[in-house]
Image: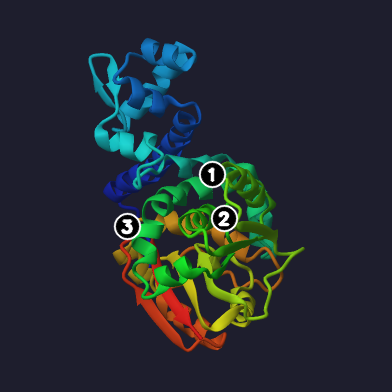
Amino acid sequence: MKQRTSLDRDRLRDFARLTFGTMNGAVTAALIHLGDALGLYRALASGGPATPLELAERTGLHERWVREWLHNQAAAALVEHDDGVFGLSPEGEAVLANEDHPAFAGGTFSQLPGMMRVLAPLQESFRTGLGLDYDALGPEGAAGVERGFAPWVKTFLVPVGVTAIDGLRERLEAGAEVADVGCGAGVALLELAKAFPASRFSGYELSQHALDRAAEQLRAAGVDNVSFHHVREDPLPEDGRFDLVLTFDCLHDMAHPDHVMAQIRRAVKDDGLWWIADIKSHDSLEKNMAENPMASMMYGFSVLTCMSSAMSEPDGLGLGTLGFHEERAREMTAAAGFSRFERVDIDHPINAFYAVRP
């Protein structure tokens, strides 16, 4: 790369705009979190367009604060505005207010407080190399991960995902032993448990905050074929008992995913299946920048959460958010003793899916 030495005034203006544009996004993201946490989007969706006073009365909030929040949202084109009345478009309702819609994204913003709190300790991580585990993000971190992935899981996992893998539905209907490694709050496991009552499901997780949420979700679901385990106290059995092992959106977060893969090989039956879901990515920065419009956000998430978790133990591999691309997945699963690797045809905006067999 050839370094320019003279300053161009037009480039300076454009670069300053670009820089402050990132601050604009950060501030607006914080207000999206407030709108989600305070129920402002839900109130606009359920009650229809409103003046600031009407929306404040609906939510029991102070009008002056609601008015300024609405002004930010209108300026950011997230909320529609006409002569002092503010409302959500149908698309805005789907993305920001309707937690049952597969496009819902509002829940992801509940991670923001936790991510901002780790900025100070992460400075030390840059010096020592040792990152922070997911529990450093607090309960909001676990909630944000759960609410970010739950809409797709609840809508598509059973009718689309299970069907996309030959023989999987029949095996689950007949009664299978299933482990979810890195189960988080258990959203995927509970959806499968409700759909396939003849099967038994065991979730294994390192985050205590996630396990606390999983326990709450289990009580609400009312199923009796699910159990959750803290992996440090009750590790994954390595006796070849499982018909199916899941690792959904977690391998790139693990400090030692190679060790976990070897454990999974010992845990799964010789005719069993390992189902992987992980972030779509490529094997170079250039490809990720060219083909992923969210690449900068993904690399940012990596520093704040994913790579930090993957570096939270000595000698952690530190794969990071975009580090588990298909080529690496093929290499690592083969090294763990798996001989068959197939990319599964499932349309998902963020994840790629793989079916791996011994």
Residue 161 visible in the current orientation: yes
Q: Is residue 101 above or below residue 183?
A: above
Q: Are dots 1 and 2 in contact, CB under 8 Å?
A: yes
Query: Label 3 amino acid?
Result: Pro
User: Residue 60: x percent and y percent?
Assistant: 49, 14
Q: Position of residue 338 (x, y in %)?
A: 51, 86
**Which residue corresponds to mark 2?**
305
Q: Nearer the viewer, residue 110 or 204?
A: 204
Q: Amino acid at mark 1?
A: Gln
Q: Sequence-wise, which precedes: disc 1 or disc 2?
A: 1
Q: Is residue 49 above or below residue 350?
A: above
Left or right, residue 283 beside residue 87: right
Badge 3 is on which residue? 293
- Whichever of labels 3 and 2 marks the residue nearer the N terminus, that label is 3
Taking the spot 31% from the left edge, 27% from the top edge, the residue there is: 74
Kind of residue at disc 2: Thr
SS for callout 3 = loop
Q: Residues within 10 Å of mark 1 (few under 14, many from 20)?
A: many
Q: CA separation, marks 1 and 3? A: 21 Å
Pick whichever of labels 1 and 3 is earlier in the sequence. Answer: 1
Please say if 103 is above or below 317.
above
From this viewpoint, is residue 115 visible?
no
**Secondary-structure class at tag 2:** helix
* Residue 30 point in image, percent of width and height: 48, 35
> Percent x, y for residue 344?
35, 73
Mark 1, residue position: 111
Residue at 49%, 53% (x, y): give it: 194
Quarter-of-image position of residue 336: bottom right
The 10 Å Cα crowd at callout 2, few under 14, some 14 to 19, many 20 or more, is: many
Determine contact: label 3, label 2, CB under 8 Å.
Answer: no
